[in-house]
Amino acid sequence: MAKPANASKSPSVDVNAPEVEDVELSASSGLGLDRYHIAILGELQRDARLSNAELSARIGLSTAPTWRRVRWLEEQGFITGYRAEIDRRKVGLGVLAFVRVDADRNNGASTKPLEDAIRALPEVISCHYISGAGTFELQVLATDLDAFSRFTIDVLLHLPNVKDVHTSFSLGEVKAGALTPLAHLQSI
């Protein structure tokens, strides 16, 4: 690991002054990320509650440029938020359903109201356009099978442009809440 350009600076140097590695963002990936950005993303994925001082110590950069880099990652949309991971079972949400929604018409004008309606449903924790059969794949949480059945009949089947729904249930989690892989960025 190369020594940061500011490592030889004396403590009396203005910590708000830009450092060489803070000013020059690598454009080799087209993403504007360098090794410090990647390290920050990795560390904050593992523990988003790190203080800036702890984070800067872990990545080998002083606190001021670390803070600026975190702020830049937030502003550029690489970091989209900080949230607690909640065990759904501990809060009474024992059913995780995977619901394929078939739209009646698959065009922008018809699908937009359906997208908006899905976004407004707190029971839907994830929604993806999918290839193959169906239009959307949803992940839906419910307290039990009866609650899921009511949600499907009373809500999902009444959404605009819904032709049909097909459901599979999780029988057990093997992996959830995984970190976003960053290994492909290591060559930057």
Image (cartoon, grey):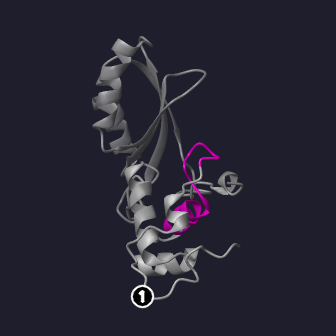
Does residue 13 sit above or below 82 in this rendering? below
Type of the residue with mark 1: Ser
Does the stretch in magenta take in 80? no
Camera-nearest residue between 155 and 32: 32
- At x 62%, y 54%, the residue is 181
- At x 45%, y 88%, the residue is 11
Does residue 92 sit above or below 171 in this rendering? below
180 relative position to 160: left or right: right
Report which quarter residue 123 is drawn in.
Answer: top left
Q: How many marks?
A: 1
Extreme residue in the bottom direction: 11
Residue at mark 1: 12
Residue 102 at x, y = what percent?
Answer: 46, 20
Q: Is residue 58 visible?
A: yes
Position of the C terminus, as image quadrant, is bottom right
Within 10 Å of the Cα at label 1, are there few (<14), some (14-19), or many (20+) other Cα atoms? few
Camera-nearest residue between 32 and 9: 9
Does residue 19 sit above or below 146 in this rendering? below
Residue 142 at x, y = what percent?
Answer: 37, 48
